[in-house]
Image (cartoon, rainbow, N blue to C red):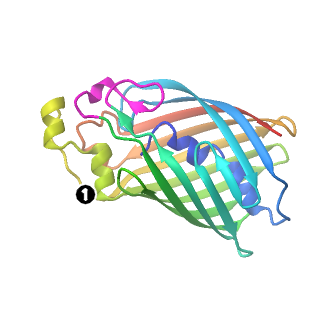
Amino acid sequence: MKPINKLWPLASLLLIAQSASVRADQAAPADPSLMVGIGAVNTPRYSGSDQRQWQVVPLVQARDGAFFFDSQKGLGYDLQADNGLYLEHTLGYNLGRSDDNNLWRDGSDKLKGMGNISAVANTAIAVGWQATPWFSVEGKATLPLTDSQGVQYQGSVTLLPWQTSSDTVALQTAALFGDARYNNTFYGVNPQQSERSGYATYHTGGGFYAMQSSLTWNHQYSAQWGSMLIGNYTWLGDKADDSPIVYRRNEFTAIAAITYSF
């Protein structure tokens, strides 16, 4: 999760159910594990776009104790105290945005003249509390390490209303915030961009820019094979919606994935 782009929902939603279940488990650390899979995503071309596209995304998760690699989150570790408090730190990569239709990152021909937003390496720090096996709260900050896109923050609440040996349903609601550089990088239009693209200039400040809610269903067919279905809804606040490059305030993303665990 991925500005709000086609990969962000996968990073923050695709493995909610699995992550919450692991944190809720107070047993001894599990043996090293590896999961691979493939997901199909139907998503807006960029945050605020009224155009949609399909994308196929490979999935890889490996874990050894507190350390893990996630093809969507990056490389990281997580630590949990006995009282349910936990810390997660990751090093990842954001693909930025293109000013033309693009199959592998956000972008649309409607952004011609806006220029590309460069890809950036970033680090994310999340602090949360697994209050019960079915309820957790979390605060997260994502900071750029190379070319700056600005800083993004989010606060989220996750519920697991249904858990069985083969099925887990997770519901998450998150409030998204950005500093002034972040919000203007993805929603602003500076004078040079305005002259090239024809869009009116737009400048905004830092603060709240979106709400995001998701429903995730994780089903295990066997010890190895599993599947996930995710529906994600995003509502853009005024700092984003007032931008001339935003054509649609309400956004939906659908994700279906099949996984295999070794």
Residue drawn at 33 percent across, 25 percent down:
100
Where does residue 191 sit, x and y in percent of width and height? 13, 42
Picture quadrant of residue 76: bottom right
Main secondary structure of the magenta stretch:
loop
Across and down, in percent, residue 18 comes to 72, 50
Residue 189 image position (x, y, % from top left): 21, 42
Q: Is residue 62 left or right of residue 13?
A: right
Q: Name the secondary structure under disc 1.
A: loop
The magenta segment: 99-115
Residue 23 image position (x, y, % from top left): 73, 61
Along the horizontal axis of the image, is 88 left or right of 248? right
Task: Please name the residue shown 84% across and 34% down the image.
Answer: 221
Q: Neighbour class for label 1 at 10 Å: few (<14), some, many (≥20)?
A: some
Q: Please determine whether, in this image, residue 164 is positioned above or below residue 78.
A: above
User: 71 above or below 32?
Assistant: above
Whether residue 154 can be seen here = yes
Q: What residue occupies the far front of the structure in this picture?
A: 146
Q: Can you identify the residue that label 1 sits on?
A: 205
Residue 2 seen by the camera: no
Q: Is residue 132 above or below residue 117?
A: below
